[in-house]
Image (spheres, helix red, strand yellow):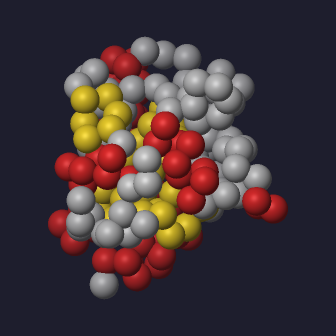
């Protein structure tokens, strides 16, 4: 596949969601986990979402249990945790794998379009973020330590 809009995922309720539903939007795609040291970033992600959703931002959270088994729950557990602890309203998807032989096709594409440090495609940890412009181009990859507050200026520049 050569276009981000050709991919789809199952939302947290198990329903197929084509990424073409987000055509024209700026996307921040994040692999998340509920029991990670970076989990408090949910608060910043939700704040970013609330501040810029009406300007064209969508944040897509893809839970992943590949790093320290820090996302052990099922979809209901994840949804409840995110809603109760962080008031998450941005779209969450079912758990995916972001590395290895069972990598979700979207993540294969994201890693190819925005390789990590020294050209490594692998996702290093939870809360790696990919920023996609309104035309579907992957413009930047952010590390888990890049907080939502730190990347806000990049988001704003694409919404302008």
The percent coordinates of residue 88 (x first, y second) are: 33, 42
* Res 51 seen here: no
> On screen, 51 above or below 4?
below
Residue positioned 48% across, 76% down in the render = 154
Residue positioned 47% across, 78% down in the render = 153
* Res 80 seen here: yes
The percent coordinates of residue 12 (x first, y second) are: 31, 27
The outermost residue toward the front is 1
Q: Quadrant of the C terminus?
A: bottom left
The answer to which image quadrant residue 133 occupies is bottom left
The percent coordinates of residue 54 (x first, y second) are: 18, 66
The percent coordinates of residue 106 (x first, y second) are: 46, 42
Left or right for 52, reference 118? left
The residue lying toward the viewer, choosing from 22 and 151, is 22
The residue lying toward the viewer, choosing from 82 and 69, is 69
Count of labels in the image: 0
The outermost residue toward the right is 118
The answer to which image quadrant residue 61 occupies is top left
The answer to which image quadrant residue 57 occupies is bottom left
Left or right for 99, reference 156? right
> On screen, 44 above or below 64?
below
> On screen, 79 above or below 41?
above
């Amino acid at each position: 596949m050569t276009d981000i809009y050709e991919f789809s995922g199952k939302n947290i309720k198990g329903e197929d969601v084509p990424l073409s539903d987000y055509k024209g939007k700026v996307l921040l795609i994040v692999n998340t986990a509920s029991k990670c040291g970076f989990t408090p970033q949910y608060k910043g992600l939700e704040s970013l979402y609330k501040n810029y959703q009406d300007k064209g931002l969508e944040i897509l959270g893809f839970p992943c249990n590949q790093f320290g088994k820090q996302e052990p729950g099922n979809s209901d557990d994840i949804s409840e945790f995110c809603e109760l602890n962080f008031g998450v309203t941005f779209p969450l998807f079912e758990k995916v794998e972001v590395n290895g032989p069972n990598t979700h096709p979207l993540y294969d594409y994201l890693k190819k379009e925005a390789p990590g440090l020294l050209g490594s495609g692998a996702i290093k940890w939870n809360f790696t973020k990919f920023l996609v412009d309104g035309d579907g181009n992957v413009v930047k990859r952010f590390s888990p330590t890049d907080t939502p507050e730190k990347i806000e200026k990049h988001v704003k520049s694409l919404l302008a």
